[in-house]
Image: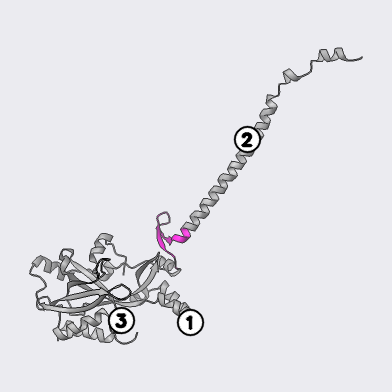
Amino acid sequence: MSNVLDAVLAQYEKNQIGGGAQSKMSQDERMKKYFALILSDKEKSGQRRVRILPTHDGSSPFKEAWYHEIQVGGQWNKFYDPGKNDNERSPLNEVYEELMSTGKESDKELAKQYKSRKFYIVKVIDRDNEEDGVKFWRFKHKYTGDGIMDKIIPLFKLKGDVTDPREGRDIIITTGRNDKNFSVVNSIMADDVSILTTDKEKANDWFNNSETHKDVYSKKSQEYLEIVATNKTPIWDSEQSKFVAEEDKEEKETASLSEEINMMKSESFKQSKNDSIVESEDDDDDYDFETTSLDSDDDDDELPF
């Protein structure tokens, strides 16, 4: 067996036991790098053909990384686990460990949403979109034995190293929907032996591509993950030049607006009071002393003495 085949099979056997820096890539560039098998709303099934790219050093092309799957702002997201991947502090793992330590069944159940899970990431060429170049296919490791990797391994065992650039094979992936209407991989088969490409330029670009999954799947900052760990939504605050919780910012803005309204009311009240005082003073000024004052001479004439 080839070195690659040995490496892939050894990796698979190991994972049956037991249960990076921020990318500078633009969002559009990153989207082209994703290989996804999600069916459109109108599709009930589909078929895709890809070629798994070989490695230079004969190691397994399937890289392993741990991700948290958490719902943020109403959408499910995958967050790179800095703890298990890079031995760094992980706010989400801290919440998981804290909940597990209480011994309460309710907390153990809640802790599940903070637990990171192992994923495989492999470089592929999407035969329907070769102009996009190298793509990254990320899928979850399943200890139940019915995952995508469990469908790929038989191809290596039966057909040999399917990643070989000259004598490898494309793989054909058939997708469908489960009882919850989610897209799922039903089967993976190996095509006939074929060369990776006859185009020298493509061959050089694909084979010498130096990108890693860390370039494509972003690693969030500690402050970002700390906000996610509190079940809040991180947003970028340009004034503070950092991520803040959207909920806290809205609350602060609401409080600030209320304070501003109260100040405006207070100023309006003061102005109204001042206006009343001014009006009173104006009434005194309007009093015509000349026309209402007594004529001293006339008064003297009317006196009885």
Residue 26 in sight from this viewpoint:
no
Q: Secondary structure at mark 3?
A: loop
Q: Earlier in the sequence, mark 1 or mark 2?
A: 1
Magenta span contains residue 53: no
The residue under the point 40% across, 60% down is 235
Marks 1 and 2 sit apart, C-alpha to C-alpha, by 67 Å
Measure the alpha-carbon separation of dots 3 and 2: 77 Å
From the image, tell me which residue sits under label 1. 105
On the image, the x and y values in percent for residue 90 come to 40, 73
Disc ID at residue 34: none
Mark 3 or 2 closer to N-term? 3
- Residue 142 tag number: 3
206 vs 174, nearest the viewer? 174
How far apart, in angstroms, are the residues tagged by discs 3 and 1? 24 Å
Residue wearing tag 2: 275
Give the residue type that dot 2 points to.
Asp
Q: Are marks 3 and 2 in contact (CB under 8 Å)?
A: no
Q: How is the image coloured?
A: one colour
Image-quadrant location for residue 121: bottom left
Task: Identify the element where label 1 is drawn.
Answer: helix
| Amino acid carrying mark 1 in the image | Glu
State which region is magenta.
Answer: 231-249
- Is 150 located above or below residue 176 in the figure? below
Q: Residue at x 43, y 61 (%)?
A: 244
Tell me the element at label 2.
helix
Quadrant where the C terminus is found in the figure? top right
224 and 89: which is toward the camera: 224
Asked if labels 2 and 1 touch by Cβ distance under 8 angstroms, the answer is no
The residue carrying pointer 2 sits among few (fewer than 14), some (14 to 19) or many (20 or more) residues within 10 Å by Cα, namely: few
The location of residue 56, given as percent across then percent down, is 17, 76
